[in-house]
Image (spheres, helix red, strand yellow):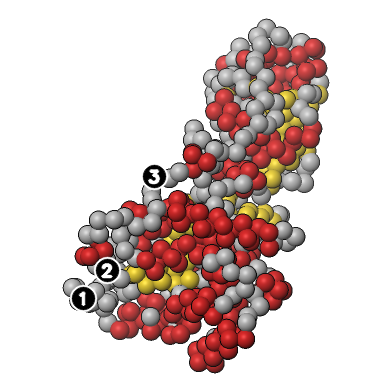
Amino acid sequence: MLANICTGAIKGIEGFAVSVEVDIAPGMPTLAVVGLPDAEVKESKDRVIAAIRNSGFDFPLKRITVNLSPAELRKSGTHFDLPIALGILAASEQLSPSAVGKIKDLLVMGEVALDGSLRPCAGVLPMLISCQKLGKTAVIPPANVLEGHVSGSPFISPHTLKELADYLEEKISLENVTVSYLPPEEEEIASELDFSDVKGQALAKRALEIAAAGGHNVLMIGLPGTGKSMLAKRFASILPPLTQEEALEITKIYSICNLLGKSKLFTRRPFRDPHHTISDVALIGGGTTPRPGEVSLAHNGVLFLDEFAEFSRSSLEVLREPLENGQVTISRAKETVSYPARFTLLAAMNPCPCGNLGNPLKPCTCTPMQVNRYKSRISGPLLDRIDLTVTLNPVKYTDWNKPSEGETSAQIRERVLKARAIQKERFAHSSTTANAFMTPKEIKTFCPLPPEADTVLEAAMRKFGLSARSLDKILKTARTIADLDGAKNIETKHLIEVMQYRPLDRKGVADL
Ligand SMILES: [Zn+2]
């Protein structure tokens, strides 16, 4: 007999519906899975056999063929266990006809343990969202219930394969849940890490405020202990709140990576700080079964790369694509997968390998050649994608000892939100979301310079030999500073402020 169960699969961060056809015919006892399953799906056979036996059913000793269609798309994940097991029960007539009749209204996903209990699986949220149009009730493992809530789809979550069978036979009832996701309350977003914890470093704080307001990337250079990571960790506290669409995008990515765990849904922008020994695949995504990397886990949030110059050259090079396009494309033999990766890059590095160059108290033990080699590890094209560079100096005792605290994150965030509101209006008819992502045409439209400012920029261009890309960066950043200032047009003072954060244009990396 033939049974047909509906489930889902993932491509990139989107799901698609998959039909699991199970045919049982007389012949040598075998279980074959066809229809482009990857190694993960093939492994499900042994779990399914044990789960069926341990749930009080018989495993049919016949020729069983499982076909996953559409056949041309690769299927990966452990969630095929449950639809395959259910299909075998239906095709072997171990379920009553009325129970089998109900299966067509279900969208089934879940990994099964050997004892038949349902275990969490990856990618439930994107599959639920993409399959919503089918109008089916989802069957998901209890550990994935949170994703059911977020999707807004109706679902049930049995604990075991037996419980699902009993539900279909109307021996037990399972609660049918539908709860839509509500955007987070403002109070929940308040962070325990606050900008007022960081003493001094006014210039760096201002650079981060500009970055938050316009979506710009920042490089912080400073001696160890000057507060680079303290500042980076507080950066998320001055970012605008997530829109519902952004929150869903991030939650989907974490769902695919099985990283949602028991934590609440994304109410905050993600902050990722991978170690400099990270592999290219872990940073950018990929692998035999493609998975999003750190750049995608930082999507709509912050990627903090401490010890920037210690990252391998290839790691730094692969960063160029997401920095340029806001996404990562991974090509494999038969398919190409894209993951979103639009993040704000915060990079931090010491001034030299020993970390003491410029320290008045400790001598630097590096040779000039070592210092040069260290700095040149960050290539020109990568530096081109950094809008603001700021040097942090050791904190002065008077700053550290100040009785009054600096500005709080809430105060800075208020200005950031105002500047963001201006940009929202500016880009109402465009796909651009912030000044940092303006197209050349938008730069022309939104960054006209008054004659005086034009002269200043032209002089700077002549003196420092600025590239066209640098000029664009300067204008985009100046636009953000003008927005923070509430100014309609970029003024000379805004341009001059930007130049403070462009030491690389003036000196080149080796002379920093
Ligand atoms: Zn040194």
Residue 109 in picture, x, y percent from top left: 66, 30
The residue indicated by pointer 1 is 360
The residue indicated by pointer 2 is 394
| Image quarter (top left, top right, bottom left or bottom right) of the N terminus | top right
The residue indicated by pointer 3 is 192
Residue type at numbered disc 2? Pro
Dot 1: element:
loop
Q: Name the foreground residue: 153 vs 451.
A: 451
Residue 29 in picture, x, y percent from top left: 69, 24
Residue 56 drawn above or below residue 405: above
Q: Is residue 224 visible?
A: no
Residue at image position (72%, 28%) is 107
Residue at image position (61%, 19%) is 158
Residue 260 drawn above or below residue 48: below
Q: Name the foreground residue: 79 vs 284.
A: 284
CA neighbours of label 1 inside 10 A, class few (<14), some (14 to 19), many (20+): few
Q: Mark 3 and mark 2: span between their CA atoms?
A: 25 Å
Residue at image position (37%, 76%) is 374
Residue type at numbered disc 1? Pro
Left or right of residue 133, residue 218 in this image: left
Q: Name the foreground residue: 374 vs 476.
A: 476
Name the outermost residue toward the top.
171
Q: Tell me whether the residue at label 2 lies in contact with that at label 1, contact meaning CB atoms closer than 8 angstroms.
A: yes
